[in-house]
Amino acid sequence: MAPMPSAATKGRLRLDRITKTFGALRAVDGVNLDIEAGEFIAFLGPSGCGKTTLLRIIAGFEAADSGHATLDGRELGTLPPNRRDVGLVFQNLALFPHLSVAQNVAFGLELRGHAKDAIAREVAQALALVELGALSGRRIQQLSGGQRQRVALARALVLEPAVLLLDEPLSALDLKLRRQLQQELKALQRRTRTTFVFVTHDQEEALSMADRVAVFNHGKLEQFGSPRDLYQRPASRFVADFVGEANIRDAAQLAAFGVAPPPRSLLVIRPEDCAVGAAADGLPARREGVIETIDYIGPHARLRIGLDEVAEPWVALVHGGAVGDLAPGARTVLGFDPARAASVPAA
Amino acid sequence: MKAGRLALFAPMAVLITAFAVAIGGLIWGSFTRGGVGLYVDLLSDQVVLRVLWRTVWISALTTLFCVVLAYPLALFLARSKHRNLWLILVISPWLVSIVVRTFGWMVLLGVRGVMNTALRDLGLIDAPIRILFTPTAVLIGLTHVFLPFVVIAILSSLLQQDRRLEEASRILGGTRWQTFRRVTLPLSMPGVIGGASLVLLMATGAIVTPLLLGGLRDRMLGTQIYTEIFQVFNFERATAMAVMLLVIALVLVAPLRLLEARIRQAQEGV
Amino acid sequence: MGLSPATRIIAILLLILLPAPLIIVIGASFSPRAVLAFPPPGFSWRWYLEFLGSPAWLAAFGQSAIIAVVAAVVTTVIAVLAALALDRAPARLRSAAETAILAPLLFPHAAIGIAFLGWLSMLELNGGFIGVLMAHLILCAPFAYRPVAVSLRQIDRSLTEAATILGAEPRQALTRVVLPLLRPGIAASLLFSFIISFDEVTVTMFLIGPEFTTLPVSIYTHIHDSADPVVAAISSVLILLTAGLVLLIDRLVGLRIFIDIEEEGRQAPA
């Protein structure tokens, strides 16, 4: 692999009104996306939202019904998957069981007709990049889950693709291993400066790894922005609800607080912006309610407070110490500052 | 896309067509050359009727014996730790030609064969038992020849069963026999019926074993067809009998296959 | 689960009885006199020498071997092509095609024999190498197809996609990923076809002629005319060769393949 350039030179991916229908189902519905070279992008959404279909369209395994996809100015259109300069790490990894680690990584290089010693060198570099140098002769069956992940990554990256697609690659791993690999993936992306598109349904994973996150729901792109933007300025109710936790309230429910949202909108109040008991003094919006449950999570306490029988209880996240004598069943005051709340359309 | 696939399938398609032509030609030929009248003649011929009946009952009994004997053996193999070793014993005869196996039985069952000699030496009999060239010998030979098929069919069915189903039955209070009768046996029925239909089919169409072990006096349909061609040189009659054989096979085997499919479907629903 | 003593006894008896005729044949082959006896009254190689010194027997052996090898290779190639063609075909088409491929398994051999006789006679190919070969190709096709189709079905879709995204053209994905993973199926296919062809007698006996015959058919004719120990010697050679084959199968793909093929084969449309 050539020495890394200082900035990414390729990997600019543009999706223009991509649509794909399966029978009656709109899997991908008019998606527009502009991804810069060298970005780490996450496609986030619940199962069935179309993120994997979109990934496969970019890879070339599905054809879009309408719309364009261009990579570095080149129309991807009808190009077959083997000629797109796109890499893919499959959900089940798809490592070749009849080949060793080194042979798996060398696969694409051999197809390109590189010289034997050049291949050996590049394979060694790729394995070193993912820290698997010592295992090059092993058979796939002998590796652990984390090790296999790395082989799959090395196999794709050794070809220096413009874009690397990853289809929920970490979903089969246990929590600790997943966290570790998340770090390694992020570092890898930084070093190789390849555009990464990472599909996941785990919003924590997406928010912690990606430069920008595309949130999908029922085939539609709900929002595309940095993790901070998604959290602090959600574009829709779905995003506000899916990304992190939120108290989403309409005009009727807010009337009791003496607060009104903008016309035809809902207010999104994050749990950590809610104060309880004495700490709520001085806040513009306050009401009394009954504590339903208190969960202690590390240094924090998560309280569910019911304000009236009908509506959903509010969730407040406060510092453990602020709970004091409060216990489930007690009455207390819940307060928040409307200026800190975001608003989303009421549709 | 499909055009390329068509090319790949072409050689196989040739084989399939050739087979269809051969069988079709057989059926067609029997009607154009001999005509329906030939069938009427055959079906009123006492000899032919006896051959037909003999074919049916020997095939049916062979199937019964095979199933009854194969099941314990399959059970034994299913639970055995040395399964591979036993499998070699079961599979090896299967791989040797029918002629050789039948010949072995001729040596065993002949008047001066191994069995008779052994029984005489042991003083159990005075005169040799005449088994060779009787329907009994044919039964024994056919059962021996086809037993491995049924064993494998039942064995594969047994091995597919989830062990935990048996355990569930036991923990619910079932004895070994009850568990077998209510869980193991019903679940293995597709395999049993599949194996049975296979044997029934093969037995009806057998030639070498019935001929060598049964002689020319008590023929089965396969043997009859063969002698019609190579001794009597009556191709028309042979063709018509072959068609009758097809019909008998269909009538005997089709219901079994349907039954097997139905039971399989019912069980797969879970 | 423990087995009742009755089951055990039957199983063990059968395990002894199944290879018994073969053991007896091997034993009788060493008899110094022209009489089939077990245990043999002496020890002599004479019948083996007679077999190895007879041009007629050796010709029959050679012809059987050649046909079996050619049939195995050709049928396996045809089967692989067919399996690849059907691999991603729409379900109903695939179902119909597989039923057609497996069709010969549903017909009694005696009927198939006479059907082929008529068909080959029409083509004026009867009684020779080509005719027998063609018949064997058709008979072996179902046995060659099943292992290959099963093996192919077990290959994960995503492996071909992985090869493609790494730059492989469809042909390269086939040769570098699919075919290597298909090796166990192909090996099983070759072995099954070889065995079926080499041992085939019931159909082949209709198709031989003055210039061409196969070993099993020759054995049959010889037994029919005069059952002398040379047949025992030839049979012993065949038995030993088969035993070698079984061990080879065990080493290459494992004996389980017989069981797996049976189960998969019956669950697939047939």
Image (cartoon, coloured by chain):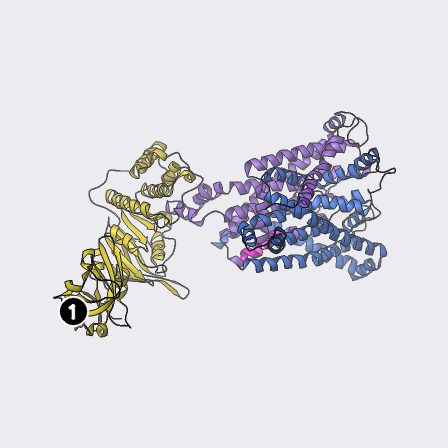
Q: Secondary structure at mark 1?
A: strand
Which residue position holds label 1? A285
Q: Chain of mark 1?
A: A
Q: Residue reaching furthest right?
A: B127
Whether residue C119 is visible, yes or no, is no
Q: Position of residue B145 (x, y in %)?
A: 71, 44
In the rendered image, what is the letter of the chain coloured yellow? A
C92 vs B22, left or right, is left
User: Which region of the structure is painted magenta?
Assistant: C93-104
Q: Position of residue C190 (x, y in %)?
A: 58, 40
**Which residue shows up at 72% across the image and 37% down it?**
C20
For the image, the number of numbered tags is: 1
Q: Residue reaching furthest front?
A: A325
Q: Position of residue C250 (x, y in %)?
A: 58, 37
B43 vs A126, left or right, is right
Nearer to us in this view, C246 or B85: B85
Main SS, magenta residues: helix
Colour chosen for chain C: purple
Q: On the image, which quarter does residue B260 sit in?
A: bottom right
Q: Residue reaching furthest left?
A: A282
Q: On the image, which quarter does residue B73 sit in?
A: top right
Whether residue C262 appears in magenta in the rendering, the answer is no
Q: Amino acid at mark 1?
A: Ala
Q: Residues within 10 Å of mark 1 (few under 14, many from 20)?
A: some
Colour chosen for chain B: blue
